[in-house]
Image (cartoon, grey):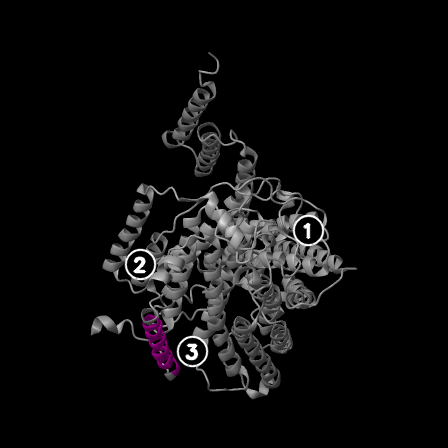
């Protein structure tokens, strides 16, 4: 019995017991459902073992939406707690756990898989490739992310959630002040999914550099591919820092090392330093693919080619470099001298310049365009003013002297939500609506989509703009309650109303998917939006080999050229296509990673060592495996192409 | 005959031995800590670059340019991170 004591929640409440029951019931329901409908084989063959970039992309998408609701539930609880002064809905400990998991889930398990979803779905199609460069590695990346996310999510029912903030600053996150296993979960779950992210980075860079269709030079790549490329370069350079920092934090907590402790020569602020060396580039890892999606959408629905293609690319390259030069602005008040703060103030403000260039490029793309106000375009148009406000408040925060006023207040919280929600979340929802027909074969309902957009936009403004005011008035972030005399009450109530509107907005997305699945027509053709870039040139649904014949590229908008300027996209005869085989190893190996991670969290060394050996066995198996893939014969291609609407 | 004799590799090998000998001097002679560390760092970086170019054939393939770009970019990021951290946490504290 004593052994199982460690898995107990240190700080239980009825809500957590209810979640335990809910999780158990849902798990049983899934198992029973799969057995009853005899879908185990289908699940294993079509999804768990797949190496197809489109299916992996869809799995990323589903996980991201799932995590969006998990993080959103945290958000609505926080807002409800703060809606009135001295509320008793949550106590301090629960509030700490909730803001911690909200941050981690939203950044690492919602936004990251969302961008990986679009990279997986779009990059190979936009460059005319059959798959990514290393399909099996891609599957491993996904499953590592997935099991990392699951490990993090069980923390609140097994052993207790992390409660040291999503930044998990030491010494608070050290053993002295964080005594539960929560922070172990943080260190290890993020580590596991971070390894997956790093592998995706390498995979995507190789894909983009090596697998472009004939004629596609770097400067003829669609803008989303460019943004994905730059984002992955940042991933490859930034994530190793996080990996090392997490490892150091783990050994501090589990093996008594002194990297981030306050005594014995440790340096507690070194964690903050490392965290933000990764953390600031991470912001751009998220926002650049979002910019890429906006570029695609704005140019399609303005009926014009993207204004300033070269300056778009140049500004992204510049952002990628500058993103590594600004990390100190997250802790201006730590106590370093004026010289350091001045340097990082200037570099931070400098980032506004290339970002501004991009904003103007989108405006000029729309200028004199024939704009169609579809749902994806609404998100893009809403993004420009809202994101610009987020950017301007960012420049305010960048002034290190003034930052002493803003630091750790709701002003900061308002700023980064103002950058991330219109920047990343709107982009993901715009991309979701825009690319939905390509991957699922039907359009999402425009009417429901528009109400979603308005609910989210109005909800967003109501939820976050009041925080700018309360923040300047001195409401600190991460406090679980405040007294009535502070006067923060009414504005926080407005925030809660806004958050509730956003919650309704997110529910309408699910309703929209259900409604459209039932009612939308399926005969939409392969190009329902009259789009411009290569991903729309293949059939809907996309065949497993993407393109039956290699496309011939003439410009960054080859598909548009083929529609309007008589460019011949596909030439020659069908040839045999070489494709990779499915494999169960990535799934199994990631599941073993989960076991290893769980054992490390609870310092159970025997299962941890066994699991680590299992991981090495999986790698060994791969090294000695002879797998040459399979070939799709010409006859089969002809039949598929015939079935999907004939060759173009 | 000229193509058969790997002059570049032999020269590289000799040079890397020289670098090793210089580094060894730090151990066998009585230098101050600063001088010793400087010698070690300089020889180590030259050594690494030498290995990369001569024995790992960086720059010999078609994408040699991108290899150097990557190394250059990585070096800049590493230098900025290390010296930035030193500036923040030690020199300007």
Q: Are marks 1 and 2 in contact (CB under 8 Å)?
A: no
Taking A89 as reference, is A151 above or below it?
above
Q: Which mark is residue A596?
A: 2
In front of the other: label 3 or label 2? 2
Circle 3 crowding by C-alpha within 10 Å: few under 14, some 14–19, many from 20: some
In front of the other: label 1 or label 3? 1
For marks 3 and 2 on the same chain, the one whose residue lies earlier in the sequence: 3
Q: Position of residue A369 (x, y in %)?
A: 76, 60
Q: Which mark is residue A563?
A: 1
Q: Any magenta on residue A43? A: no
For marks 3 and 2, give the CA distance. Answer: 27 Å
> What chain does badge 3 belong to?
A
Q: Which mark is residue A166?
A: none
Residue placed under numbered mark 3 in the picture: A94
Left of A436 or right of it: where is A177?
Answer: left
| Residue lying at 46% horizontally and 77% vertically, measured from the top left | A95
Between A622 and A599, which is closer to the camera in this rendering?
A622
Left of A5 or right of it: where is A295?
Answer: right
Residue A409 appears in the figure: yes
Taking A6 as reference, is A588 above or below it?
above
Q: Residue furthest right?
A: A368
């Amino acid at each position: 019995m004593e052994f199982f004591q460690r898995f107990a929640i240190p700080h239980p409440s009825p809500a957590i017991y209810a979640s335990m029951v809910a999780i158990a019931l849902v798990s049983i329901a899934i198992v029973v459902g799969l057995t009853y409908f005899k879908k185990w084989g289908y699940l294993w063959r079509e999804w768990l073992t797949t190496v197809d970039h489109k299916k992996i992309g869809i799995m990323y998408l589903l996980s991201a939406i799932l995590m969006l609701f998990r993080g959103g539930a945290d958000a609505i609880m926080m807002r409800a707690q703060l809606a009135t002064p001295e509320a008793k809905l949550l106590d301090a400990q629960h509030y700490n756990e909730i803001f911690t998991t909200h941050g981690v889930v939203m950044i690492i398990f919602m936004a990251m898989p969302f961008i990986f979803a679009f990279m997986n779905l779009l990059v190979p199609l936009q460059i005319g490739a059959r798959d990514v460069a290393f399909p099996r590695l891609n599957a491993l990346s996904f499953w590592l992310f997935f099991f990392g996310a699951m490990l993090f999510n069980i923390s609140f029912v097994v052993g207790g959630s992390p409660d040291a903030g999503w930044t998990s600053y030491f010494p608070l996150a050290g053993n002295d002040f964080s005594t539960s296993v929560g922070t172990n979960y943080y260190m290890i779950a993020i580590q596991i999914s971070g390894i997956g992210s790093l592998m995706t980075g390498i995979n995507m860079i190789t894909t983009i550099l090596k697998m472009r269709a004939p004629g596609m030079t770097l400067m003829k790549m669609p803008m989303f591919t460019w943004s994905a490329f730059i984002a992955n370069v940042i991933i490859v350079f930034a994530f190793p820092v996080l990996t090392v920092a997490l490892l150091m934090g783990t050994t501090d907590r589990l093996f008594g090392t002194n990297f981030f402790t306050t005594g014995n020569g440790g340096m507690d602020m070194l964690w903050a330093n490392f965290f933000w060396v990764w953390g600031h580039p991470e912001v751009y890892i998220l926002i650049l693919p979002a910019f890429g999606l906006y570029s695609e959408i704005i140019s399609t629905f303005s009926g014009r080619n993207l204004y300033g293609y070269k300056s778009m690319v140049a500004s992204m390259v510049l952002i990628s470099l500058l993103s590594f030069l600004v990390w100190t602005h997250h802790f201006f008040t730590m106590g370093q001298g004026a010289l350091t703060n001045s340097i990082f103030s200037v570099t931070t403000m400098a980032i506004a310049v290339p970002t501004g260039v991009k904003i103007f490029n989108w405006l000029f793309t729309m200028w004199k365009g024939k704009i169609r106000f579809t749902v994806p375009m609404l998100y893009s148009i809403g993004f420009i003013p809202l994101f610009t406000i987020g950017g301007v408040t960012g420049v305010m925060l960048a002034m290190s002297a003034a930052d002493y006023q803003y630091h750790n207040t709701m002003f900061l919280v308002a700023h980064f939500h103002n950058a991330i929600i219109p920047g990343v979340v709107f982009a993901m929802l715009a991309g979701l609506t825009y690319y939905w027909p390509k991957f699922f074969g039907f359009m999402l309902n425009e009417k429901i989509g528009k109400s979603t957009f308005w609910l989210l936009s109005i909800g967003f403004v109501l939820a976050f703009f009041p925080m700018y005011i309360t923040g300047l008035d001195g409401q600190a972030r991460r406090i679980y309650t405040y007294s009535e005399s502070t006067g923060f009450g009414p504005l926080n109530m407005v925030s809660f109303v806004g958050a509730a509107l956003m919650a309704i907005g997110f529910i309408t997305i699910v309703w929209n998917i259900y409604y459209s699945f039932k009612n939308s027509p399926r005969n939409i053709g392969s190009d329902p939006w009259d789009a411009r870039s290569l991903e729309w040139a293949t059939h809907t649904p996309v065949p497993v080999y993407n393109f039956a014949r290699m496309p011939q590229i003439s410009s960054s908008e080859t598909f548009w050229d083929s529609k309007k300027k008589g460019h011949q996209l596909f030439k020659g005869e069908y040839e045999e296509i070489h494709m990779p085989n499915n494999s169960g190893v990535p799934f199994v190996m990631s599941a073993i990673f989960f076991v290893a991670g769980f054992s490390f969290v609870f310092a159970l060394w025997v299962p941890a060592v066994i699991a680590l050996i299992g991981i090495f066995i999986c790698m060994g198996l791969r090294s000695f495996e002879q797998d040459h893939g399979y070939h799709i014969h010409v006859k089969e291609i002809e039949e598929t192409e015939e079935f999907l609407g004939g060759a173009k | 005959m000229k193509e058969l004799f790997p002059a570049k590799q032999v020269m590289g090998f000799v040079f890397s031995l020289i670098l090793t000998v210089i580094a060894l001097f730090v151990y066998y002679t009585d230098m101050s800590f600063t001088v010793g560390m400087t010698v070690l760092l300089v020889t180590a970086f030259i050594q690494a670059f030498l290995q990369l170019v001569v024995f790992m054939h960086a720059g010999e393939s078609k994408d040699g340019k991108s290899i150097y770009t990557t190394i250059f970019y990585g070096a800049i990021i590493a230098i900025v991170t290390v010296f930035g951290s030193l500036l923040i946490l030690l020199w300007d504290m």
